Amino acid sequence: MKKSFLLVLSFNLMLNLSAQMRKGNFIFSIDGNYIKTSSETGVISNLHVSEGKFLDLGFSIGYKVSNSFVAGIGIDYDWSKEKRKNQFSINRFHQMEQLNTKTNTFLPHAYLEYQYKIINKLFLCTKLRIGYGKINTDIHRYLVGFAAFQSDTQIQDVNDYDTYSGEFIEENDVNAFNVCLCPKFTYCIFPKLGF
């Protein structure tokens, strides 16, 4: 139980390494996280299963324009892959469906950050980020179903079933504009390294 908790905690925490320095210095920042999810709801006749993998990576470089303000640029990369399965049955009707999505996002951004010193090595930072990029999504959907009908004969016939199936493939490219006001705490372990 303890290992599971620590594993989940480590995957869900965002690692953000940066440095707190004086006016006129450059600041490099790296952040990222990885989340893997799995859920299952329902019973055998009505079942929904979802599995996902999500990766977020970012890099930025800033210039300390004063002791409290940093201006900079950066790039974020988001990748996700999700698989959803759904099975639905009621009376003589049965349907199974699967949806696979894969998303890639590149989002360059500019930012302005205000840093307020709380105590010796602990800072409260507020970052305003403005970004613009592309989101690419691939969608692949499978669908199969049938309805069983009672025939007037004792022998089952091909006409006793009404079946359907389909496969749908779609690719979307959309523009993304992002504005984010992000508060965070930064603790400096060393004069040139913080998290």
Image: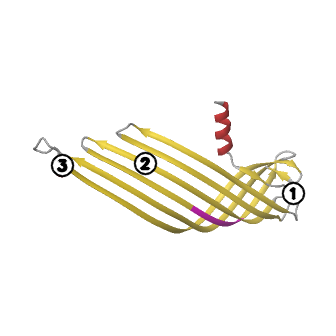
Q: Position of residue 5 (x, y in %)?
A: 65, 35
**Which sits earlier in the primary sequence, circle 2 or circle 3?**
2
Q: Position of residue 116 (x, y in %)?
A: 80, 52
Please give left or right for residue 2 compared with residue 192 in the image. Answer: left
- Can you identify the residue that label 3 sits on? 160
Q: Report the number of discs.
A: 3
The residue at 87%/57% (across/down) is 21
Q: Secondary structure at mark 2?
A: strand
Q: Position of residue 3 (x, y in %)?
A: 67, 33
Mark sitting on residue 21: 1
Please give left or right for residue 34 compared with residue 19 in the image. Answer: left
Q: Mark 1 touching mark 2, by CB under 8 A? A: no
Bin the neighbour count of mark 1 within 10 Å (Cα to Cα): few under 14, some 14-19, many 20 and up: some
**Which residue is most to the front?**
155
Mark sitting on residue 85: 2
Nearer the observer: mark 3 or 1; the answer is: 3
